[in-house]
Amino acid sequence: MSEIEKGWYKQWFNSPYYYTLYKNRNTAEAENFVTKLVEYLQLPTHTRVLDVACGKGRHSIAMADMNLDVVGVDLSEEAIKEAQTHAHNHLQFFIHDMRLPFWVNYFGVVVNLFTSFGYFNTQREHQNALRTMCQALEPSGQLVIDYLNYFPIVQQLPAEHFIEEDGIQFHVKKWSNTRHIIKNIEVKDGAETYSFSEQVAIFSLQDFESMLSAYGVSIKAVFGNYQLQPYHADTSDRLIIIAEKQQV
């Protein structure tokens, strides 16, 4: 059975090498994005927010600092262990699989940021994850999905590069098939070599529109980058969806 079939995210996201490879992710960019997002959504103080696949909580922490009541969930035990060191009365973290229900009809906003979706092998699993997000929203609640914009990425594949961080060497290869963008990461740490994988499903704006409609959620706005500029399918860096749950 291949690493992807086993559920690549269970091993990779719990590996210290994941955080070494991506340690230079731009925290300031994340904070600026959250600030723009909260301003756009016009969220009142102490709006209840669910951050699905929160990782170590960088977006959750930023939202809590803006006087929102935030709950972050993630499958990675190591990530949640780190995130919980930042917890307080208005910021909580839990280990949770996004494919399973979580606090139904409770949150004013649900966010899924930095391409934290599309990890699974089957359409049913992706639908289950979206169901969790949509069911967690209270009526008229807002859903934010920040996804990769696949078309420009696919046009640039295949890609291969080498990175060294903290004396650890990473050999990264990317490619795509009809369903996924796939990344293989070979890690050389001293005399030891390890292999990890990432896969993200290829979804278009129309795909999301169709999937969300099954749960009574409709798209209200779409942006193409973290500055919330207009979305263009052929050139935008991101596919950022703002959707709203219908009132009962």
Image (cartoon, grey):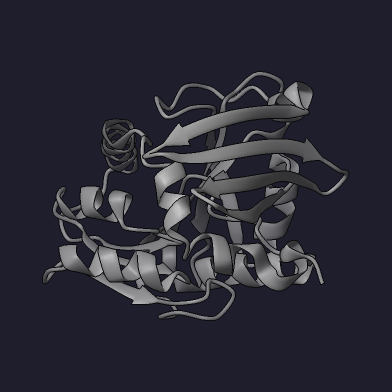
Query: In the rendered view, does 102 fall on the left or right side of 160?
Result: left
Furthest-right residue in view?
178
* Quarter where residue 8 is shown: bottom right
Q: Is residue 162 above or below residue 111?
A: above
Q: Nearer the viewer, residue 179 or 193?
A: 193
Residue at 29% of width from left, 71% of height from top?
81
- Residue drawn at x 34%, y 76% is 94
Task: Return the x and y of residue 145 as percentages of the image width and height.
Answer: 52, 48
Q: Is residue 202 visible?
A: no
Toward which corner of the image does residue 117 lie, by quadrant? bottom right
- State the residue at coordinates (57%, 48%): 187
Query: Residue 1, image x and y in percent?
Result: 82, 72
Where's residue 199, x and y in %?
Answer: 69, 52
Decide if residue 228 is on the left or right side of residue 145. Answer: left
**Residue 167 location, x and y as percent?**
41, 39
Quick one: which residue is furthest to the front in this view? Answer: 191
Give the residue at x 52% y 39%: 169
Q: 186 or 44: which is nearer to us?
A: 186
Task: Find residue 155 and report its image quarter.
Answer: top right
241 and 141: which one is in front?
A: 241
The correct choice, above or below, for 107 with respect to 95 in the image is above
| In the depicted structure, whether residue 134 falls above or below residue 228 | below
Would residue 147 be visible to someone looking at this image? yes
